[in-house]
Amino acid sequence: MTFTDRIFLANYSLNAISAALPAGITSYLFVAFFGGVGGYAGVFIAQYTGRGYHSKVGRVLWQGIYFTLGSGICFWLLALFAAEPLFTFAGHPQDVQELERIYFTILCKGAVFSVATVTLSTFFTGRGLTRPVMLITFLGVIINIPLDYGLIFGRWGLPELGIRGAAIATVTAWVTEAACLSLLIFTKKNNHQFGVFSQYRFDRRLFARLMRFGVPGSLQFTIDILAFTLFILIIGRIGKLELAATNIVIIKGRVARRVPNPIPMRIEQKNSEKTTRIKDRAGPKPIGFPNWISPPASSLLNFGHPCVIIKAAIDTRNKRTRMFRYSSLVPV
């Protein structure tokens, strides 16, 4: 969703596009950790599905929900107390800092719905049903894009909110996705088969297992994001134009990275399901999927689009920022 925000903000103002990436990637640093732990519930659901213990699926899902609710408290604390000192320490220009705080605060206050979407989607992905999650994700994108345009630029009778509107549109899409998943999951039919209502009790041992395996697995990806976050914050010390150019390059680069990104988690879930079946009875071998799929997939996209054209400059006569045709090739 923040990907769409940055596309529109790149055509809104230099300050907005400069602030969107540092604030967005910093908030995503925490979303990645909590979402990674909550998403690990899918591995447990795959194990129970492989064993045929369908009645325990709801219990695992609820442990993920309890963790998600706890993450919501952490996000609000970050929004209330971390935004100002964090971006003051980053040392970016003052006008960019103000926009960074606004964007970061709104995203953090709504980030619990992003984590909830990841956690709830494990009910389907853990059982090998990826289509409902795909369709709901598309719905979120369809809602986010026009809301971004309307709230950033003030179209269709909506107020012109700039970067604040971009954050509101993103959170609205997260809420929509979480609500749709909840409507599909919490039904009488699913309660009869999976115990999505009846297995709501907190299970300390199961929750501890989720933390034991989920936290290390999530930390691996989170540390990668941390390194990237520090790089972006350092770039912002150079200047607004350099930060904006980096932002636009990363818009393209993220497309290349996101294509193979869900593959490892899906493999882990399928391996958990199939390995469990092997332990109980003769069955198919676990999936053997080469780890080198991500580099070729990303390289293929980069080969098709070897460069990004950056169009950004400052109109000093009018003392305002605008985007115009100044082309420079930036390799990715």
Image (cartoon, grey):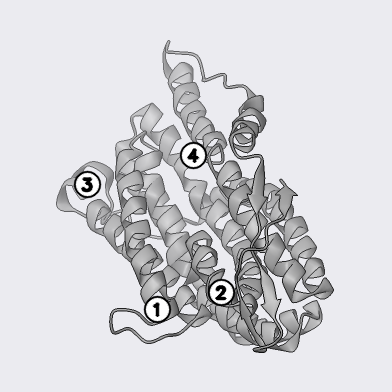
Q: Secondary structure at mark 2?
A: helix
Badge 2 or badge 3: first in the primary sequence = 2
Front residue of this view, candidates 17 and 312: 312
Q: Which mark is residue 11?
A: none
Three-letter amino acid code at the position of disc 4: Val
Instruction: Choose mark 2 or mark 3, whichever is in front.
Output: 2
Front residue of this view, candidates 158 and 135: 158
Instruction: Choose mark 4 or mark 2, whichever is in front.
Output: 2
- Relative to 43, residue 84 above or below: below
- Relative to 17, residue 82 above or below: below
Front residue of this view, candidates 182 and 238: 238
Measure how far apart labels 1 and 3 are at the Cα level: 38 Å
Residue 137 at x, y = what percent? Answer: 37, 52
Residue 270 at x, y = what percent? Answer: 47, 29
**Label 3 CA crowd tier, 10 Å (few <14, some 14–19, many 20+):** some
Left or right placement of residue 226 versus residue 177 in this view:
right
Instruction: Choose mark 1 or mark 4, whichever is in front.
Output: 1
Three-letter amino acid code at the position of disc 3: Asn
Badge 1 or badge 4: first in the primary sequence = 4
Residue that label 4 marks = 43
